[in-house]
Each structure stands twice: as structure tokens, then as C-alpha cells.
Image (cartoon, grey):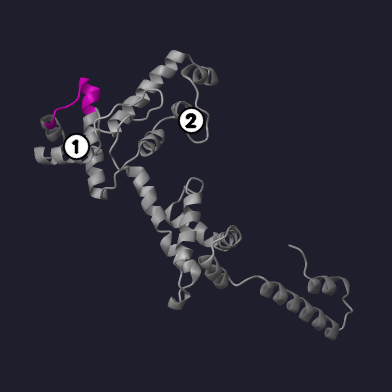
Amino acid sequence: MAESIFETITKHLPKATDEQLKELQEAEDESLTQRESAEPDIKSVIKRWQQSPNDEDAGFLLDKMKPTINAAMTSYAAGHNKDLAVKAATLTLKALSTYDPSYGTDPSTHVFHNLKRLNRIVNRRGNIIPVSEQASMESRYVYGKRAEFIDEYGREPSDLELADLTGYSMKKIDKILTRDKVKSETSTLNPETFNSTVSSSDVTDQDYFEYVYRSVGPIDQKIMEWSEGAHGEPALSGKEIALRLGITPAAVSQRKAKILKMLSEVRGLV
């Protein structure tokens, strides 16, 4: 850390009188006060920005709110600093647009409270369809037993067999399986781009894509990105993808088929 004027004088001019040192300290304090007073008050900038939004004021406010945004990300969206950075900034500015100093609330407190929405976004990404934690646990249990049955017998269990495996009633099994199916029209998925041709669901193709993307390994993730042209990657043909990955086009096709099946399953189409 750089030495202050006062520290420099104290170190190199030990014989300076107390009066001289006092004058130097006062001069430094005055300079600091002038610098602080030159910086606009955040509440006045908020008011000005509310009346006439502009990039300069938005940048100033986001810079001032950076510690608050970071704290909110840690509390509500840990591990999502990169993918939710833009959303956090958008929510911050939206919160400031409704800030009213007459309530006596500090701007940072108001912003932090509004950034709680980040937690709902993270939860929605993880579940696709928001459900209670109890319902989520029930679903994992049922589908875990279903997977064990398939591994052992090589076929899908009937609802009656699932009820026997889980100890749940037939009515509850039906409720869980029905709840977990995404409400969408019957549609087909393009095996090249992984997009559906028809969909009336509130859950978008991008939601399905991201859900499966987080469930597969790095090679399949690259295949998904290059097939779709997603996450800033170029859209490539199967042969181009094979060349980049150093595998055969047939291997790419096999992996695409597996990804397509996963997408179909989360959409409730199979």
C-alpha cells in the first residue's frame, strides 16, 4: 500500500516540527474530503437515472452496488456468478428504478432484497418444473426404483410393479408420474438440433436443452453446443463435429441419439 503524505514526511523528515506535521495532516484530510465531495451522491444519481435512464448513470450505480450484488450471489446463487451476472445486473437496475428514499431504506438493502429472485431462478433451472422438496424427493425415489428395475429386467416396470417396488399406492404412483410429465403438445424432436417442432409448454426448448446439457459429460456437451450453435459456439455438421472431437461420424450419431432420447424423456414424450 502506498504511503500517505503524512507517513512519508514522518519517515524521511523526522526533525519536522509538530506544527508542520499537523499542517500536512490537515492538508491531506482536506484533499480527501474534496475528492469525496466531488463524487456524486448515490441517491441523487438514482433519482436522476429514474427520471432519465442512461448508460453512464447505470454503470455508476452497478459499480456502487457491486459489493451488494456479490453478497446476494453468494447467498442466493452460489456457483452461478458467471451465468447469472447479466441477470443480477438487470435485477439490480430494476430494483433501483423502484427505490423510494422516503421509506428510509438504504439502496443496498433494497437491492439485496430484490435479488432474492436469483434463488428462484437457480431452483427453476435445477428442477425445470418447480415442485416442493418433498415432491422432488418422491420423484427421485420412484425414478431410482424404476432405473433399478430396468437394469435388472431390461424393460420398463408397470405402474403396479412400481407401486410394489416403492411401497406407494397406485394412486400416488400415477400422481407422481403425471406430475413429472411436462405439459406440452405431442411433438417431434429434430435429431440434428435437438429442438421440438411443436410446443405449447411454458417451459421452452432452451430449458430442456440446458437441463440435459448439465446432465451429460464434456464430450456430449460439445456435441450439443455444436449441433445447436449454443453458448456462442458455431453450428457444425456431424462430420465437422467428429473431426473436432477426433471420433468417427458414427460415434457422433450414436451420442446424438442418446442425447435425443434424454431430451425426449424430460419432455415426457417417451
User: Residue 145's quadrant in the figure?
Assistant: top left
Q: Is residue 8 above or below residue 215?
A: below
Q: Residue at x 78, y 67 (%)?
A: 3
Give residue 151's position: percent from left, percent from top. Answer: 25, 24
Q: Is residue 226 above or below residue 54?
A: above
Q: Is residue 165 above or below residue 80?
A: above
Q: Nearer the viewer, residue 249 or 59?
A: 59
> Disc 1 or 2, which lies upstream in sequence?
1
Quadrant where the C terminus lies? Answer: top left
Q: Amino acid at mark 2?
A: Gly
* Residue sticking out furthest to the front: 52
Which residue is under mark 2? Answer: 229
Viewer-nearest of labels 1 and 2?
2
Give residue 269's position: percent from left, percent from top. Answer: 25, 29
Of the numbered discs in the image, which one, if any, rests on residue 177?
1
Give residue 33's position: percent from left, percent from top. Answer: 70, 77
Q: Nearer the viewer, residue 192 or 125?
A: 192
Q: Residue at x 48, y 20 (%)?
A: 237
User: Residue 155's quadrant in the figure?
Assistant: top left
Q: Is residue 158 above or below residue 84?
A: above
Q: Which residues are magenta?
A: 148-159
Secondary structure beneath label 2: loop
Q: Is residue 151 left or right of residue 251?
A: left
Give residue 142's position: percent from left, percent from top. Answer: 21, 37
Query: Is residue 259 found inside the magenta-colored segment of the image?
Result: no
